[in-house]
Image: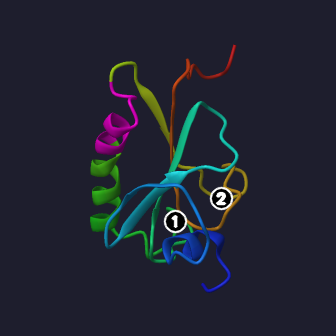
Amino acid sequence: MSDCIFCKIGRHELASDIVYEDGELVAFKDINPVAPVHVLLIPKKHVSSLLDEGAEEGMLGRALALVPRIARQLGLAEKGFRLVVNTGKEGGQTVGHLHFHILGGRDMLWPPG
């Protein structure tokens, strides 16, 4: 999808603070963080959500296996972090491109409080 904001980031058409990149996946700092550390991990290929047929097992496995590496790189391994994948409107997904939120740097208890 040419107008998808995350596709544009994956193609380097929009500036972003990239923390990891390979041929299939890219991780970058969220521009509206909800935690001191808030990174989004996305496939470069447009996949609308976990429910999309394009969310193939191999890519999902590689993305999930990459999360601990990114968490360590960001200094989150010692105290922990949260991994979130919102799916669909009622699931809180606001951008129609599959993305994993890697959150940390503060107490991530849920519900907050």
Q: Is residue 36 above or below residue 94?
A: above
The three-letter amino acid code for the residue at tag 1 is Leu
Q: Quadrant of residue 87?
A: bottom right
Residue 69 falls within the magenta-colored stretch = yes
Vertical placement of 7 versus 51: above or below? below
Q: Which residues are magenta?
A: 68-77
SS class, disc 1: loop
Instruction: Residue under label 1, please give it.
Output: 51
Residue 36 vertical position relative to residue 54 in the rendered view, above or below: above
Q: Amino acid at mark 2?
A: Gly
* Real-space CA distance between mark 1 and mark 2, rounded to the nearest whole angstrom: 9 Å
User: Residue 18: x percent and y percent?
Assistant: 47, 57
Asked if labels 2 and 1 touch by Cβ distance under 8 angstroms, the answer is yes
- The earlier-in-sequence mark between 1 and 2 is 1
Bin the neighbour count of mark 2 within 10 Å (Cα to Cα): few under 14, some 14-19, many 20 and up. some
Q: Position of residue 1 (x, y in %)?
A: 60, 84
Q: Is residue 71 magenta?
A: yes
Instruction: Please say which color scheme the image uses.
Output: rainbow
Label 1: few (<14), some (14–19) or many (≥20) C-alpha neighbours in 10 Å: few
Q: Which mark is residue 88?
A: 2
- What residue is drawn where x is 59% and y is 76%? 8
x, y (%) of residue 110?
Answer: 60, 23
